[in-house]
Image: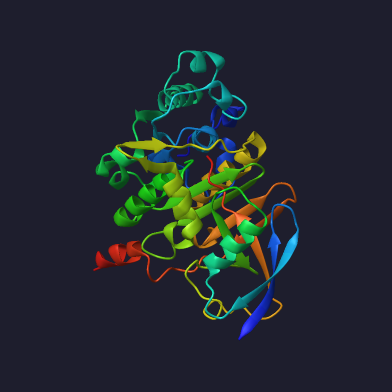
């Protein structure tokens, strides 16, 4: 016999409106582990969207501390966090948990290059919310190696991009890079004698562009995990907020890219 | 054989004509255009229509022809 319904019962279910979308596999989202790399502006928005979308297992990685200049675009950071120089990953994890106590959110304070290999293997999807090319290449390589989908986002002033990498198929982040990327990378790590100087340029950034890009990232993650990979971005989405132009640009697979050889070698 | 293309600056909308040889590479076009507009030292990509062009490709390999319109786009690196 069916369980009797009660008036107003649907209002008690926090995911009731999401269920009405139909194709979203809420059970799958709840059981999946999302690895969010970077807890800056994109990381804040992405985590907010993940929690509201029904993800309950989230790992956040970032090595930085909160500063005042983060406060124009980071939903979860407060002035006190900047004054205490709190770690971004820890603050974000705590505040995300307060949105839904059922969520298991872990903040890891570390450089992405120092992460345990198992973290990629144990995740179902990675969301790149990074601010530099070196870290992007590192995450891209690990996702390709472990065949984990990666949804990478980037912003610059009022423009942004989202690229979905679905190893072992299709192009990866490295395929879309050229010499200007590697020159930018070299400028970040200029070796002067015995010391390595890390130069971090201050990039223009504002919240509306961040919100758009983070929303697209999380929607692509939901599609992938809900078995809607076919309707996912297959290449690179470029967003120009000044003209409201959105372009999906085809990224050719680079035959010289070492990562495709690496991911193909594991195919049975 | 040389080809003449128009490169558009995605940030400002301004354009510049470039004369290219078949063996010129996409990254040379990117660096030439970025240098002409004295752009910040960041990462850029070049698109032709809906295709992002691979840096190592030559003009010939990329199928760039006379009167083609190309666009120089800054690659958003921030998070």
- Indicate how the structure is coloured in the image: rainbow
Q: Among all residues in the image, which is located at the extreme front?
A: A193
Residue name at image x 63 percent, y 82 percent: B2
Between A122 and A156, the one nearer to me in the picture: A156
Between A55 and A203, the one nearer to me in the picture: A203
Numbered label tally:
0
Residue name at image x 58 percent, y 38 percent: A203
Between B36 and A74, the one nearer to me in the picture: B36
**Left or right, A45 with reference to A157:** left
In which quarter of the view is residue A116 placed?
top left
Residue name at image x 46 percent, y 26 percent: A92
Residue name at image x 34 percent, y 53 percent: A141
Asked if residue A229 is positioned above or below residue A252 in the image, the reply reads above
Q: Is residue A83 visible?
A: yes
**Left or right, A1 with reference to B77:** left
In which quarter of the view is residue A268 placed?
bottom left
Asked if residue B49 is positioned above or below residue A11 in the image, the reply reads below
Q: Is residue A177 visible?
A: no
**Quarter of the image that includes the N terminus of chain A:** top left
Asked if residue A101 is positioned above or below residue A233 in the image, the reply reads above
- In x, y percent, where is residue B64? 61, 77
Between A160 and A21, the one nearer to me in the picture: A160
- In x, y percent, where is residue A99? 51, 24
- In x, y percent, where is residue B56? 47, 69
């Amino acid at each position: 016999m069916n369980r009797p319904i009660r008036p107003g019962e649907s209002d008690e279910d926090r995911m009731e409106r999401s269920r009405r979308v139909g194709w979203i596999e809420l059970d799958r989202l709840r059981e999946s582990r999302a690895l969010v790399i970077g807890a800056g502006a994109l990381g804040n928005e992405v985590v907010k969207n993940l929690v509201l979308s029904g993800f309950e297992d989230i790992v956040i990685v970032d090595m930085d501390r909160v500063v005042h200049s983060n406060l124009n675009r980071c939903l979860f950071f407060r002035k006190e966090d900047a004054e205490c120089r709190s770690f971004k990953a820890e603050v974000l994890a705590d505040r995300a948990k307060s949105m839904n106590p059922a969520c298991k959110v872990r903040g890891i304070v570390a450089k992405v290059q120092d992460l345990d290999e198992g973290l990629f293997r144990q995740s179902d999807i990675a969301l790149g919310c990074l601010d530099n090319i070196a870290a992007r290449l590192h995450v891209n390589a690990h996702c390709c190696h472990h065949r984990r989908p990666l949804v990478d986002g980037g912003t610059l002033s009022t423009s942004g991009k989202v690229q979905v990498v679905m190893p072992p198929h299709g192009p990866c982040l490295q395929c879309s890079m050229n010499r200007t990327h590697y020159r930018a990378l070299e400028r970040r790590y200029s070796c002067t004698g015995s010391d390595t100087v890390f130069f971090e340029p201050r990039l223009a950034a504002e919240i509306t562009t961040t919100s758009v890009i983070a929303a697209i990232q999380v929607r692509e993650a939901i599609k992938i995990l809900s078995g809607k990979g076919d309707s996912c971005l297959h290449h690179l989405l470029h967003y120009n907020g000044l003209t409201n132009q959105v372009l999906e640009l085809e990224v050719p697979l680079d035959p010289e890219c070492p990562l495709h050889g690496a991911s193909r070698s594991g195919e049975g | 054989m040389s080809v003449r293309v128009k490169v558009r600056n995605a940030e400002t909308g301004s354009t510049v004509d470039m004369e290219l040889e078949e063996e010129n590479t996409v990254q040379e076009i990117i660096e030439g255009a970025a240098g002409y507009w004295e752009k910040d030292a960041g990462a850029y990509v070049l698109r032709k229509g809906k295709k992002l062009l691979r840096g190592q490709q030559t003009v010939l390999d990329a199928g760039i022809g006379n009167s083609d319109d190309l666009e120089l786009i800054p690659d958003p690196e921030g998070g």
